[in-house]
Amino acid sequence: MSSTPHDPFYSSPFGPFYRRHTPYMVQPEYRIYEMNKRLQSRTEDSDNLWWDAFATEFFEDDATLTLSFCLEDGPKRYTIGRTLIPRYFSTVFEGGVTDLYYILKHSKESYHNSSITVDCDQCTMVTQHGKPMFTKVCTEGRLILEFTFDDLMRIKTWHFTIRQYRELVPRSILAMHAQDPQVLDQLSKNITRMGLTNFTLNYLRLCVILEPMQELMSRHKTYNLSPRDCLKTCLFQKWQRMVAPPAEPTRQPTTKRRKRKNSTSSTSNSSAGNNANSTGSKKKTTAANLSLSSQVPGLGAIPNCSLNPGRDGDLCHSTAVTPSGQFKEKH
């Protein structure tokens, strides 16, 4: 059977540059399929370096993973950062799980400028347990993923809301222990809580403490400081941010206030010149325009400009000092 141009492995006779390429952006769910294959390739010898490489391949450097579910004591919500994601997946297998994969049905995709969102209301996390007994656990819920819109197409946010779960035990195991009441009682008990093992739940509780300590760990790794010095430095910087004075508002330039003063004086001079022919009006105008310091000896005027307008809408007013030491405001 000959290959066609629609075959992704089709080799064009015009050279390799004409080969058809199917990018990741066509089907974001394919990345989940690749993640399932990578989890299936895990071995018992997989160490922390393997899990770090796994997280680097499928999660962004600033990715977050959120789990929401409801236990007997109320609803829970845990959010962990990128540095804690590898350990989360490893704890799933440490709790007796031998296989882990995700099934997405009827998911909806929405494309944005720099990201792709996949919303799957019928997501199932399937875990195969080998101990304490052979059990298949199906955890159902809603999974919302946000991928970066680039060639790597890694996960930026992971939010899995668990609604219900089912633990399935093979009939053959029940038939083998049909005559043993103790084993049947043991088989009737759940081995998970909302589809999560005790190892994973304990780790999520621990992450509540570990997540705020990421700044201390990063500082210790970068500057090689002791834990006590890292804590002192972080607390001091946080205290500086708390007591730092707020930024001062931008003040109005003083040129506007000087301009307002000149316009007031020029108006007074022009009114005095227009009334020069009338002796009585000239006296009134002169008395109105003369400062109090020229009328009463020992009296001074202190200019005091404010950004709040006065009764006449003027920005500037003066404070007069009487001989007795009292202050009198003049608008």
Image (tube, rainbow, N blue to C red):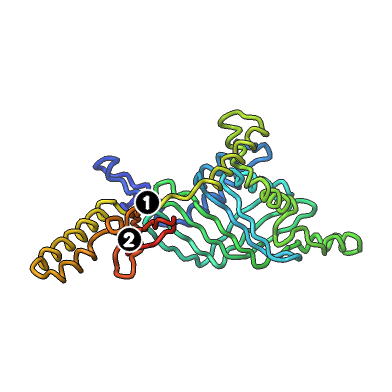
Residue situated in front as seen by the camera: 112 or 197? 112
- Which residue does the numbered mark 2 point to in the structure image? 317
Distance between mark 1 and mark 2 Cα atoms: 75 Å
Which mark is on residue 22?
A: 1
Q: Position of residue 173 (x, y in %)?
A: 80, 59
Establish if 249 lies above or below 240: below
Q: Is residue 98 visible?
A: no
Residue drawn at (75%, 65%) of the image? 73
Residue drawn at (67%, 61%) of the image? 76
Q: Position of residue 186 (x, y in %)?
A: 85, 60
Tell me the element at label 2.
strand
Residue at the extreme left of the image, as rendered: 277
Establish if 113 lies above or below 17: below
Residue drawn at (58%, 37%) of the image? 218
Q: Is residue 17 visible?
A: yes
Q: Position of residue 141 (x, y in %)?
A: 61, 65
